[in-house]
Amino acid sequence: MGLFSKTSKYLEYEYMGHRIEVHNWWRMVPTQSAATLIIDDEIIVKNTKWSHINPDIPVLKGSGLSESIKSVEVFMIGMFSMKFALKINGGLVYSEEISRADEWQRKLFGHKTS
């Protein structure tokens, strides 16, 4: 991950016959990022704000998507490499292990939203 180069991360997750994809890219200088949530080849939501600071607030959110997917929330955190967490219908279905630096970021910038 260079300061001036574009870095990207991709997640594909299967849930009850649906293909859920998360595409994310970012660059430190100049500060830019974009994240996209795609379900069954349909773009659900896209976020182009620099949004990895608070790991307790979803970067991407969709609701009322199908009979089996009432809501999707995508969380991101990463000081040196991006990690994803995915909630479907309010339950955590996927998360990546975070580092000590990520835990520091969570303590510094995170807050409980409920």
Image (cartoon, rainbow, N blue to C red):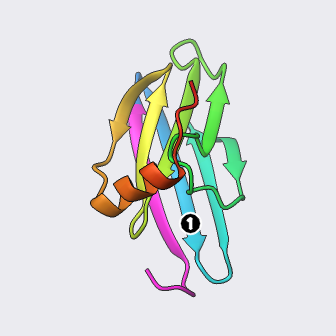
Image position of 42 with respect to 76: above or below: above
Q: Is residue 17 magenta?
A: no
Residue at x-position 58% and y-position 69%: 26
Residue at x-position 42% and y-position 48%: 84
Image position of 106 with respect to 86: above or below: below
Res. 41 visible in picture: no
What stretch of residues is rendered in magenta? Answer: 1-14
The residue where tag 1 is placed is 25
Question: Which SS class for mark 1?
Answer: strand
The image shows residue 17 at horizontal and vertical percentages of 42, 25
Residue at x-position 38% and y-position 57%: 104
Image position of 100 with respect to 71: above or below: below
Image quarter hosting the C terminus? top right
Res. 88 visible in picture: yes
Q: Is residue 2 magenta?
A: yes
- In terms of depth relative to the viewer, which is nearer, 3 or 102? 102
Crowding at label 1, few (<14), some or many (≥20) Cα neighbours within 10 Å?
some
- In terms of depth relative to the viewer, which is nearer, 111 or 73? 111
The image shows residue 100 at horizontal and vertical percentages of 29, 59
- In terms of depth relative to the viewer, which is nearer, 16 or 71? 71
The image shows residue 81 at horizontal and vertical percentages of 39, 66
Residue at x-position 57% and y-position 12%: 67
Q: Which three-letter amino acid code belongs to the residue tagged 1?
A: Trp
Quarter of the image for residue 73 reads top right
Residue 104 located left or right of residue 43: left
Residue 50 located left or right of residue 103: right
- In terms of depth relative to the viewer, which is nearer, 104 or 59? 104
Residue 18 located left or right of residue 57: left
Image quarter hosting the N terminus? bottom left
